[in-house]
Image: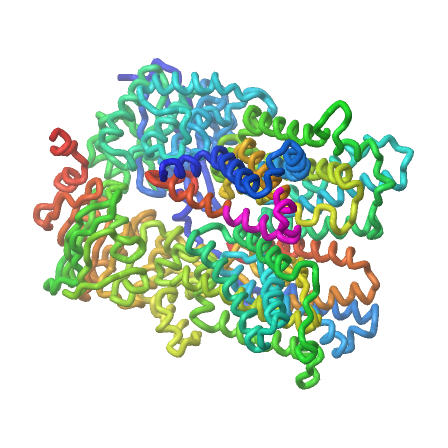
Amino acid sequence: MSTGDKAPLLSARGISKSFAGVEVLRDVDLDLYPGEIHALLGENGAGKSTFAKIIAGVHRPTKGTLILGGQPVEVTSPIVAQKLGITLIHQEPISFPDLSVAENLVLGRQDGGPLGRVRWAEITREANRLMDLLGVRIDVTKPMRGLSIADQQMVEIARALASDSRLIIMDEPTAPLTPKEVATLFAIARRLRDEGRTIIFISHRLEEVRALCSHVTIFRDGNKVATETIDRMDDAEIIRQMIGRPLKEYRHKRTTELGDVALKVTGFTRPGTFRDISFSVRKGEIVGLGGLVGAGRTEVARAIFGIDKPSAGTVEINGKPVSINAPTDAIALGLAFVPEDRAAAGIFRTLSVEHNITAAVPGKIAPSGIISRLIERTLSSESVKKLRIRLASLRQPIGELSGGNQQKAILARWLLTDPSILILDEPTRGIDIGVKAEFYDMIGELAAQGRAILLISSELPELLALCDRVLVMSEGTLTADLPRATATQETIMTAAVPRRTEGAAA
Amino acid sequence: MSAVLNFLIRRREAGIFVMIVLFCLFVGVQKPQFLTLDSLRIVLLLTPLIMIGAMGQMMVIVARHVDLSIGSILGLSAMVSGMMFRYMPDMPWFLCFPLSIGTGMLLGFVNGLLITTFRLPAIIVTLGTLNLYRGLTFIISNAKQIDRQYVPSILKSMSQPSPTLAVPLIIFLSFAIAVATYWFLMHTRIGRQIFALGSNPVAAPLRGINVTQVTLLVFTLSGALSGLAGIMYASRWGFVNPSNTGAGFEFQVIAAVVIGGVSINGGVGTVLGTVLGVLLLGCVGAALPLLGIPGTTQNAIYGSVILVALLIDRLVRAQGNRGVTQRAGASS
Amino acid sequence: MTDTTATPREAAAVRPLWHVVLVRPETMTFVLLILGIFIGSQISPYFLDVAYILKSFTLYAEFGMVALVLTMVIIAGEIDLSPAANMALSAAIFAFAQANGVPMPLAILIGLGAGVLMGVFNAFMVIALQIPSIIVTIGTLTAYRGLAQVLAGDQSIRVPEWYIGIDKVMVLGIPLPVVIFIILSIVLGLVLGLTVFGRQIYLIGTNEVSARYAGVRAKRIKAALFILMGFMSAVAGLMTASRLGSVRYDLGLGGELQMVLMAMLGGTYIFGGRGTILGTFLAAWLLVIVSTGMIVANWLPATQLCVLGVLLIVSIIATNFIYSRTQR
């Protein structure tokens, strides 16, 4: 199908963007036509989200122009974007939990002055009409608090419809959704497309892109590297364009024999998040834990580490049953946990790299209860050398480092505790490809030293590259335990995708 | 039984209403004269100041802030009018309204300006201005009280039952303010924006809410209402004292607001709940002398009321959070 | 997850050592202190009279002691507005007990115990029930002061003659309250600056979640701080009772302003994670100089109140500004 006979809805010309002097988007040209679903693909940090946010008015471009329906426009804020008919739907929708669904729908629409009347009856009627239009059942008078993420996204889409948006940008909308919810979302997206609206779809999942999109644009290192119709690119080609080189299989080579069972979890249950989780990890073994976002993987790790309390289940370390009530207990038993959300649960942003590295080993830096500056400096500078952390000074606040180096510092913090069991939760998320490879080497080396490693990851290639075994969780239960030989992208995904349970019929 | 309790905790207005009824019955059994129209008037007479202040404080708390300076604003605004009565007795008396309300607006605006311009926590700013405004009150008044003879009798008569009206005017006024606040918060766009801001301050600007404007507005309104409460003070008590007038007012008001179900986490609260909270405090205030409990217990009671309200708020939150997925916008 | 997280920043120029040492709020406090003494000495020769300054300091030593602990509470990311009310109630309970025949040593213990209990109650509300400390301590501020009023009524409760006059006791020519304040500053300064406990306070205040993940017992430490706060308030309350010779319910009324002001003037960051005991120590002296200066200059108490209010706001603005310039 050719789009040449239609005028583009939106044209981007020469869009560039710099943050703090660093160029993250370079000279991007793109035409978006009415009635197309256009995928933006690229690695983390490739620039696709920045580009989408520029269109949606969240960021202003450093250079370049946007032309909407033939007219150059200045999208100075999300509100202006909304008025121009452009809506961005966030992965985790922005909402006002204490306000009703109906009110969330109309909030921000600029009709009337500040003292303009709020016509509740009209608002409710309109909200119900939109919900009917989308075919979803949500009580619009209830507060937003308590809605599932999927329903919140539906409210966002309804908002786009309410303001009659011509361009709807969905930024990784499917990550937190169940397959059934994804299907509903796709059906609605197609309907919107058929009405002549344009949809930008940002996703990491090629199969979803293939199922939904007609066009694909690929970003790499801040550049647009390709725009094509989807049927003219196969997966290998797309991946090649994304990473700029043919996909090289990284494979961690096992050099040592596996030891005894280091960590054994039996019957772990926490109502509402996971149930009856049992598995074990041996010394020197890397066990992957795969599954969709929200499957309960992080929650299991948190419970093992003593952050949350499981309602049932036991943990054995080196064959001995232990009771872990707080992270302190876990650390004393030789556990370490690199959490998923580095900014929220890992770093101390304004404190020095040094203080960050030594945070978990008070006993080492203060043998007598008084902190020894000498020991602290020696330990942290050794770690910096060993992990090749790039920094200007140990006194530097860790917030000034790049994501990869921050993550290395967190890893360094845990290595100082000399853990026998490491739990790594999405350790390479948001990290440059080059540094990623370094991490893979480090993880392999840690296992080779005889440490047991539980690696939680949403990236299938990562699991396949590193793990001796891959456990898969789906909706709070363990659905597969795949040895290296049988683990493939397909087998992992099959186990990860929730199925309508057989028990439902009974 | 627990279902009933559950309902009363969730439907805060019903809960406070029941508390008021139970309290009145409890007092009435011991002192039957409590259940007469007369004591109703006493209750109502105790409430107008707190009611007016509570409407302002409610908006501030809904927007996820707190205003500790309202007592000092009340004092300073009342003193400004008092000075007019004293030194410019020829001026028309009703000028005290624009004068005090204007003073209150200005002081509240200064609070808001400091908070928005420098991104400071409201609690520290208003702790500072609480003292600053109190100091100013002493300075402009030369630490002298405005005595009864200076306050126009027409103003004082507003707090007295008139031949035509059995209920003093200021009670009507305070209820009118409550109704106006209800209208403003529930039926105007800007009123809803206050709720939205308190519910999710991160998301608010993304929905075109001018956070600075809304914050300035709530503090200015809180100041203006405290200014009005200042005149009501002069009307009710007939004097203005630089040190006593409005001292501790903030705690009474905060007690009324939080017991009325306005959440300290922002975004939640109703005018009806706040009005009932004020009435509950009024009932307690009226019952104490009857029960022979000395007036010195008042502050202890306000403090306990705040703490009890916080506990109830916590209970509600514990229940409300069940099954909630997450609070979006706060992360990422 | 934004694309900016991957932006390399390690190329950013490191601040030279002199910058790190000099451009910090405590330096501002110190400069202001020197400036205050200089200006003061121009107004009145009293300011160069060490004995006079020390004597003036006895009026603020109690608040200063509490402010030192408050500094630690604020660094841990919490706040406590109730200590002045706690001082009043502890002192009232102590005075009430001894006035009703309880032997003095026991009465003192009861007073201190009451302060600790008040700290425990704050800790319970904030840590076990997870209610924001701002609002909890507004509530307890009202309640504690109110209870003191219930207990003492409008009366002054006298304390025994021998108990009166802690500020007249001299140690090496320095009034005892000042000595206590200085020793406490050194002890707490060492605890906050050199021990694991102190380091963990900074960790909690910077990022409580990260701290918990790193094995810091955040709840325990914060509870300890609130309880220490209660204890120190009671000590301060009993010292005030000795200085004044009697206890009324309005003992230390409005003292939360002075305490918060000392912490803020000393460069404690209101949002937690930053600040030092040294800063608060210097700020306490600065406040004494400013207050004494205003008294010597014959300013009205009301004007002094205004100045303190303005000083509070200006000091947070200045502190925030300095931190925003030196750290991102």
Q: Which residues are magenta?
A: B287-308
Q: Relative to B53, does residue B293 appear above or below in the rendering?
A: below
What quarter of the picture does the N terminus of chain A occupy? top left
Q: In the image, residue B298 lies at what x, y percent? A: 63, 50
> Between residues C114 and B43, which one lies in front from this camera angle?
B43
Q: Residue at x 60, y 54 (%)?
A: C321
Q: Relative to C168, does residue B137 appear above or below in the rendering?
A: above
> Between residues C75 and B41, which one lies in front from this camera angle?
B41
Q: In the image, residue B116 lies at what x, y percent? A: 61, 43
C58 to the left or right of A20: right
**Residue C213 lies in the magenta stretch:** no
* Residue A23 visible in the displayed image: yes
What is the image's colouring?
Answer: rainbow
Q: In the image, residue B120 lies at what x, y percent? A: 59, 49
A133 to the left or right of B170: left
> Between residues B158 and B205, which one lies in front from this camera angle?
B158
Q: Relative to B59, does residue A276 appear above or below in the rendering?
A: below
What quarter of the picture does the C terminus of chain A occupy? top left
Splitting the image into 4 quarters, where does residue A190 fall? top left
Q: In the image, residue B84 lies at what x, y percent? A: 85, 39
